[in-house]
Amino acid sequence: MSKNTDIIGRFAPSPSGPLHFGSLVAATASYLDVRHRKGRWLLRMEDLDPAREPPGAADQILRALEAHGLHWDGPVLYQSSRLDAYAEALAELRRQGRLFACRCSRQQIQADGGVYDGRCRTLGLPDKGNAIRLRVDDVQVDFIDAIQGPQSQHLKQACGDVILRRKDGLYAYQLAVVVDDAWQGVTDILRGSDLLDSTARQIFLQQRLGLPTPRYAHVPVAVNELGQKLSKQHFAQALALEHCSGALLQALRFLGQAPEPALTRASVDEILAWAVQHWDIQAVPKLANIRLDSHS
Ligand SMILES: [Zn+2]
């Protein structure tokens, strides 16, 4: 199949646990959205926090994606191999006078309502032992989400100055994701709606670094019977690899697609071939309308 190199999507899990249904939904949606347009689908492992990554989790995720027929193009990009690029981006922002060291604890900021008020901006604290933050402007960032519709966030009021390097010296997700999406040439980001709130600050960061802004779409996040997001914290079960076809069909229905009844006994490859052909982003619900029971 000839590939359309103008469309590049990606799935970017953090290897903090096995693939669960929520991450399968996000991976499947991104895969279908780019394969439907004959684009390239890349895989990036967001392995920047070794303390939260059980040994073998990254490989387990890759095997689970393959078992579900979700084959990616090219080599996997590991963020742990990209530290020089993040350092370079920080240096550029430092040249712009955008960075400052911050000694505030998460608890302090939570006590102030969760929005960082910039109190360390002018203190001239040393980098060592402190977090590094990006000074945001008093501006509103607008973008169109292909599923959630027009979005708008006032950065200073909604989130405040953004941490780019943590107190422990680890690079923050917000910096790494922006640098790597640009480096990999990603044009279409389709991911879970738990990241909708991060998009405006990522666009602001792209603009500061002179990087292009990709198209964004956020799919609903799967919740359990208690209404909690399926994540490692809530003990979401790893997908059982002997039920891949069933899990894929369930992911398609969660995404508002209507797989034909005949696909019930089909292989993952047959299901995905159908789903690539029939992918309809307009049918994806804005909010999760299916709650998963504990058998899923
Ligand atoms: Zn501070």
Image (tube, helix red, strand yellow):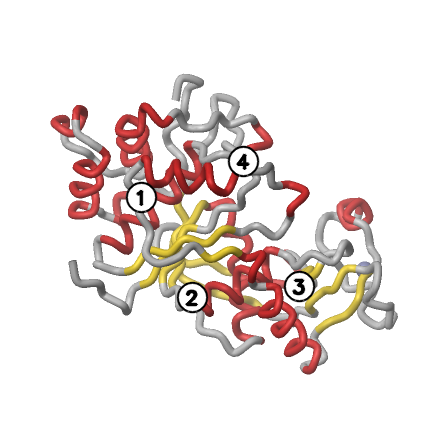
Left or right of 120? Residue 18 is left
What amino acid type is highlighted by mark number 2? Gln
Q: Quadrant of ligand 1?
A: bottom right
Q: CA distance from mark 4 to mark 2?
A: 24 Å
The mark that comes first in sequence, 2 or 1, is 1
Q: 82 or 146: nearer the eye?
A: 82
Using a 10 Å C-alpha cutoff, classify the residue at mark 2 as few (fewer than 14 neighbours), some (14 to 19) or many (20 or more): some
In the drawing, what numbered circle is on residue 70? 1
Report the residue marked by disc 4: 17
* Secondary structure of residue under mark 2: loop
Residue 172 location (% of width, % of height): 64, 57
Identify the residue under disc 2. 184
**Circle 3 sits on which residue?**
156
Q: Secondary structure at mark 3?
A: helix
Q: Which residue type carries mark 4?
A: Gly
What is the CA distance from the residue labelled 1 to the residue labelled 4?
18 Å
Relative to 69, residue 225 above or below: above
